[in-house]
Image: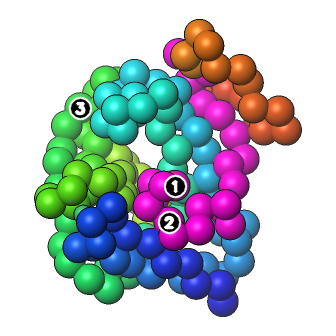
Amino acid sequence: MPTYNGGCYCSNIRYELNLDSPEQARMSICHCTNCKKFTASAFGITAKIPKSAFHLTKGQTVHHVGDNGSGTQLTREFCGACGSGILEYGAHAGDSIYLFYGSLDEPDALPPKGEFFCKERAGWLPEIPGLFHKREIKE
Ligand SMILES: [Zn+2]
Ligand SMILES: [Zn+2]
């Protein structure tokens, strides 16, 4: 069972991720306006993982709940000291949560499989070859 370690920028928060296999994490890029705002970057990049795979080993996250722009209440968990994003999940995400790529100590271990909301991709940013591309979420 592969284990991945991660945490926030200031190390107040540390976690362990226990997966059955690397394929259990579905990493994807999201170009939507909401992800840009929260990450203060050009896109969001998160892995869909089973809730049971994630274990905090140090510290506690701060939660923020807000409308994601399409009527879904989205919870984001981040470090209250340094602000690094750790997790996000919608009200209807069920047993899945989304883990922020850059919070992993070795993010290269779980590369992205696709891109969402490509209609909102930054004008200067080319498509990433080899990934699937969706204009929004479903199509
Ligand atoms: Zn921190
Ligand atoms: Zn998004």
* Cβ–Cβ under 8 Å for marks 1 and 2: yes
Residue ID for mark 3: 67
- Identify which residue is drawn at 64% across, 20% down: 125
Amino acid tagged 2: Leu
In this rendering, is residue 74 above or below 53? above
In the drawing, does residue 58 fall left or right of residue 39?
A: left
Q: Which of the 4 quarters of the picture holds residue 128?
A: top right
SS type, badge 1 = helix
Amino acid tagged 3: Asp
Residue 76 in the image: x percent, y percent? Answer: 27, 50
Amino acid tagged 1: Tyr
Image disc number at residue 101 = 1
Image disc number at residue 104 = 2
Sequence-wise first label, 2 or 3: 3
Q: Is residue 103 magenta?
A: yes
Quadrant for the N terminus, please: bottom right
Per the rendered image, the range of residues in magenta is: 97-120
